C-alpha cells in the first residue's frame, strides 16, 4: 500500500500530539492525586507550594478549586 508523504506526516503529527496530550494528562492526574492525598486543606496547600513551586495565594486557589471540583463529582 502506498501513502503520500503529506498523509504520512499528518499521521505522525497526530500520533505525537496524542502521546504528548496523554503524557501531560497523566502528569496532572498524578499531581492532583498527590495533593488530594494530604489530610487537611493546609497540608494540601503546602504540598502544592512544595511540588509546584507556587506562592501561598496561588496554592490556596489551586487547592480550593480542586476541592470544589472533587465535591461536585
Image (tube, grey):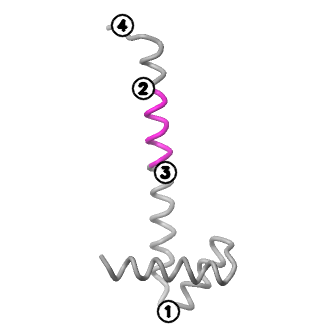
Residue that appears at 51% across and 54% down: 24
Query: Which residue appears at 36% of the width and 7% of the height?
Result: 2
Q: Earlier in the sequence, mark 1 or mark 4?
A: 4
**Residue 53 relative to residue 26: left or right:** right
Residue drawn 41% across and 82% down?
68
Region of the chain picked out in magenta, as a range: 11-21
The C terminus lies in quadrant: bottom left
Task: Name the residue that disc number 1 marks.
Answer: 40
Q: Is residue 29 left or right of residue 52?
A: left
Query: Where is residue 64 shown, x and y percent of the image?
Result: 49, 83
Task: Report how far apart the C-alphas of labels 3 and 2 lie in the structure.
Answer: 18 Å
- Residue 22 is situated, as x and y percent measured from the top left of the image, at 44, 49
For marks 4 and 3 on the same chain, the one whose residue lies earlier in the sequence = 4
Asked if 52 appears above or below 59 in the picture, the reply is above
Q: Position of residue 19 (x, y in %)?
A: 46, 42
Q: Earlier in the sequence, mark 4 or mark 2?
A: 4
Crowd class of label 4 (few under 14; some 14 to 19; many from 20; radius 10 Å): few
Instruction: Look at mark 2 in the image and give the residue it sits on.
Output: 11
In three-dimensional space, the C-alpha distance between marks 4 and 3, rounded to whole angstroms, equals: 31 Å
- Give the number of the mark in front: 3 or 2: 2
Instruction: Read off the residue under disc 3.
Output: 23
Give x and y (percent) for residue 29: 45, 65
Q: Secondary structure at mark 3?
A: helix
Q: Secondary structure at mark 1?
A: loop
Q: Is residue 8 magenta?
A: no
Q: CA distance from mark 1 to mark 3?
A: 28 Å
For residue 33, what is the image quadrant?
bottom left
Say whether disc 1 or disc 3 marks the residue closer to the N-terminus.
Answer: 3
Identify the mark nearer the N-term, 2 or 1. Answer: 2
Residues under labels 2 and 1: Cα distance?
A: 46 Å
Q: Which residue is mark 4?
A: 2
Amino acid at each position: 500500500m502506498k501513502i503520500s508523504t503529506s498523509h504520512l506526516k499528518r499521521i505522525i503529527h497526530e500520533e505525537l500530539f496524542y502521546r504528548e496530550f496523554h503524557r501531560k494528562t497523566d502528569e496532572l492526574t498524578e499531581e492532583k492525586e498527590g495533593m488530594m492525598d494530604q489530610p487537611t486543606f493546609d497540608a494540601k496547600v503546602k504540598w502544592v507550594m512544595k511540588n509546584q513551586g507556587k506562592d501561598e495565594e496561588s496554592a490556596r486557589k489551586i487547592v480550593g478549586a480542586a476541592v470544589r471540583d472533587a465535591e461536585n463529582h
